[in-house]
Image (cartoon, rainbow, N blue to C red):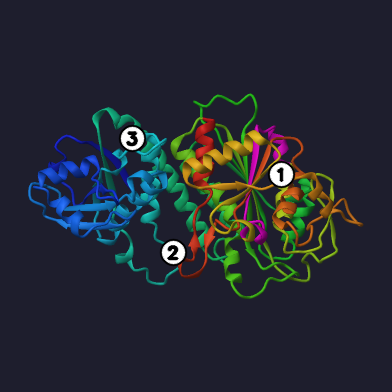
Amino acid sequence: MEFSTHTTASLHQIKTAALAIGIYADGELSPAADVIDRASDHAVRNVVKTEFRGRAGATLVLRSLPGVTAQRVVLVGLGKQSEYNARAHAAAEQGFAAYCATARLTEGASTLVANPVADVDLRTRARSAAIAAGAATYHYDTTFSAPDRDARPKLKKIVQVVDRADVAQVQQGLREGAAIAHGMELTRNLGNLPGNICTPTYLGDTAKKLAREFGSLKVEVLDRKQVEALGMGSFLSVARGSEEPLRFIVLRHQIKAAKKSKSGPVVLVGKGITFDAGGISLKPAATMDEMKYDMCGAASVLGTFRALAELELPVEVVGLIAACENLPSGKANKPGDVVTSMSGQTIEILNTDAEGRLVLCDALTYAERFKPSAVIDIATLTGACVVALGHVNTGLFSTDDSLADALLSAGKQSLDTAWRLPMDSAYQDQLKSNFADIANIGGPAAGSVTAACFLSRFTKAYRWAHLDIAGTAWRGGKDKGATARPVPMLMQFLLDQA
């Protein structure tokens, strides 16, 4: 989708299929709405008094208003003015884009980004507007035999109407938001594809395709023999149960304008279990189809790299993806098996369904070679995190307060929020094994915490944070589908670093 700007002079004379103006729940009009109201001989106020309550994200369409050139004026609810915040702004922008998409419009104009939001600058509001529009117009039909092309949104362009002095800020925010929206689209598509299509090989090919499209990306895809040569015994043990070949994907983003960081690159590590049946510790059949989403950590790394490359963001970033399937077979891990990780630490596998940490630990050890400034792993790791936080906040664990604070701040600013959970050393006791250096589970209590504690054993050489996205990477039920979280948080973090 294309995003551009238009200055507010002669707002009532803008030629467009639909013009969005904001209405607060207390009946107050936004400045742009007031201009249109006066131009239309108070037609807007008359409707607000009788028909439109201004609920956040709600819309009402007025056609052929006298004195207004736009074919439609779309009243968009902003909620109570005293409570108008970044989330309400995003809901308003998404509501307008969703209306345009549903109405089969190809273009529209919005005044919403100009509405002031406490503690949120114009650039951030514009970025949020582009992300919201991308979310509103996302449509999946890849695996339908005869896709309904009429169901695909036709919306191609949204113009943000702003003061002339604000154009540069808004254009920068729109550019950033569009890139993030494109990265989120890739992440959602990968997540929504079935496991028989989105295999480890498919993820590797996707990474290679990105490198061909964007010159700032370099990609290396390692096969089983190369992974064996690295000594990644833990990762290999998970892949052994499937006939689908594993892939270890290494991405590098570095543009010429970027100064090589003295402290090293940021490394993003994604869990890429393209289907997780649980192995010998087989999962229940109900909703097992959703285990195609167990590669959403990997998908979020690829989506983030797509956004990084489009923006040519001047920051050095490395991406690592350990991709395989976790299936039961005669070759699969068995409860009680002991494997040796790349770090040399031995692991007793008490539950084969706790496989994500087994592939991540070797990727985290591999990350040491880059001498990173920070390492962030992203994984649909534990059902326990869903129990703890539901589907609102991503679980954040870290051994470094400053890194945790930076991610929490990025999550808040991008509306892709996280909540930090504890990692007290006492939890490590639950991972003791009589037969290996460490057990791969710590029992039912504090399951998401002990999973993070397990990973921390492999991260002593650098600053590290773990994002458990088991509750936020996808939705189930009638709205089943990938969400592309935490791409907005990761991109905000990297924008802050740049």
Crowd tier of the residue under label 1, counting other residues whose Cα lies within 10 Å: few below 14, some 14–19, many 20 or above: many
Separation of residues labelled 2 and 3 (CA atoms): 33 Å
- Front label number (2 vs 1): 1
Q: Earlier in the sequence, mark 2 or mark 1?
A: 2
At label 3, counting other C-alpha atoms closer than 10 Å, the crowd grade (few under 14, some 14-19, many 20 or more) is many
User: Which residue is the site of mark 2?
Assistant: 142
Q: Is residue 32 above or below residue 140?
A: above
The residue at the point 55 percent across, 56 percent down is 472
Earlier in the chain: of badge 3 and badge 1, it is 3
The location of residue 404, given as percent across then percent down, is: 63, 39
User: Which label belongs to residue 364?
Assistant: 1
Q: Nearer the viewer, residue 369 or 66?
A: 66
Magenta residues span: 366-386
Label 3 or label 1, whichever lies nearer to me, is 3
**Residue 375 falls within the magenta-colored stretch:** yes
* Residue, far bottom: 285
Q: Which amino acid does the dot numbered 1 rest on?
A: Leu
Q: Which residue is mark 3?
A: 170
